[in-house]
Amino acid sequence: MLLRNRDEVEPVTFSDAKGVEMRPLITDKQGAPHFAMRVFDLTPGGHTPHHTHAWEHVVYIIRGTGTVLGQEGERPLRPGDAVLLAPNETHQFRAGAEGVQMICCVPNQ
């Protein structure tokens, strides 16, 4: 068994995003053979890049509000929402005025 606390994981930032920190809680580096669990914190007005990739991922909103921009347009996000993004679906997460925190699970690369 592995137990890790978000506050004990060093944040990662991205040059092509604004106001985004990611903490890789559990990945292949900790022995997870298939999936990675990451926590993202977006500051108010922050956003991920508008991007796509070949794998699916699921996202769960912990706190705050924002929007997700996908192929179907922009959708609001609030705590308790879950999002499934299909492989090759172009998307972007945007934080609202209070920021947003979310869990994102993806296959290990």
Image: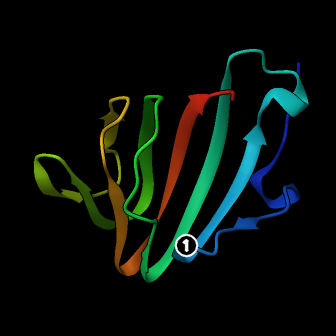
Q: Quadrant of the N terminus?
A: top right
* Residue at point 40%, 46% (across, down): 52
Front residue of 78/75: it is 75
User: With 2 as the anchor, is 15 left or right in this view?
Assistant: left
Relative to residue 30, is residue 104 depicted above or below? below
Front residue of 56/61: it is 56
Q: Quadrant of the C terminus?
A: top right
User: With 85 as the anchor, is 24 left or right in this view?
Assistant: right
Q: Quadrant of residue 34?
A: top right
Front residue of 5/45: it is 45
* Residue at point 39%, 80% (across, down): 98
Q: Residue most toward the left?
A: 72
Q: Quadrant of residue 85?
A: top left
| x then y, percent, for residue 59 | 43, 41
| x then y, percent, for residue 66 | 30, 67
User: With 12 as the anchor, is 40 left or right in this view?
Assistant: left
| x then y, percent, for residue 7 | 80, 60
* Residue at point 43%, 83% (across, down): 44
Relative to residue 69, is residue 59 depicted above or below? above
Q: How is the image coloured?
A: rainbow
**Of the residues shown, which amino acid type is indicated by label 1?**
Asp
| x then y, percent, for residue 90 | 30, 48
Q: Secondary structure at mark 1?
A: loop
Label 1, on which residue? 16
Other-residue count near label 1 (Cα within 10 Å), few / some / many at <14 / 14–19 / ≥20? few
* Residue at point 46%, 31% (across, down): 54
- Number of numbered callouts drawn: 1
Relative to residue 73, is residue 82 depicted above or below? above
